[in-house]
Image: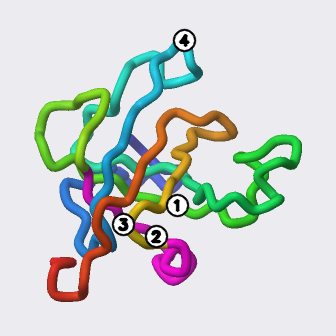
Amino acid sequence: MESGSGKVVTADMLENIENPLALATVTWLPPEQGGRRSGPPSAPVYASTTTFRTGDAVESEPGWPATDPRTVSVLLQRIDPTPQTTELVKVGFLAPELARPYLHEGAELVILEGPKQVAHAVITEVLTEDEQA
């Protein structure tokens, strides 16, 4: 692809999350429930946005979860190379300091593409600094 300056721009696919904060089980919604028409993503690392389901009043507001001010960018790295409807993933965040207060075993995430929920995840383990590599 060429940028406006005439330089060639490449987009390398992210293969690995360098410092995952947690492990989670993610379940991709079927298309008839609003999920991705193409099914689970096929790339090794999937980038999207997420918010945490906490039971706060904000979750009953119109437009939630897309309007949640706690929405953060998330990275999900499949552990098994084959895409599945329910799979174990490593979880990373572009701004980990914003996600850390909500991270605990059993925490629920709503995975979004734009305003649409495409999956949900449950944190199964929060990784220590030694386990993050």
- CA–CA distance in space, label 4 to label 3: 28 Å
59 relative position to 91: left or right? right
Q: Residue at x 23, y 87 (%)?
A: 129
Q: Mark 2 = which residue?
A: 94
Q: Mark 3 = which residue?
A: 92
Q: Residue furthest bottom?
A: 129
Q: Residue at x 37, y 59 (%)?
A: 123
- CA–CA distance in space, label 1 to label 3: 9 Å
Circle 2 Cα neighbour tier, 10 Å, few/some/many (<14 / 14–19 / ≥20):
few
Q: Mark 4 = which residue?
A: 32
Question: Percent x, y for residue 108?
Answer: 50, 55
CB contact under 8 Å: marks 1 and 3: no
Q: Amino acid at mark 4?
A: Glu
Please provide the residue range marked out in magenta: 89-102
CB contact under 8 Å: marks 3 and 2: yes
Q: Quadrant of the C terminus?
A: bottom left
- CA–CA distance in space, label 2 to label 1: 6 Å
Q: Nearer the viewer, mark 4 or mark 2?
A: 4
Can you tell which mark lies on residue 73?
1
Secondary structure beneath dot 1 equals strand
- CA–CA distance in space, label 4 to label 2: 30 Å
Q: Amino acid at mark 3?
A: Gly
Mark 2 vs mark 1: which is more N-terminal?
A: 1
Mark 1 vs mark 4: which is more N-terminal?
A: 4
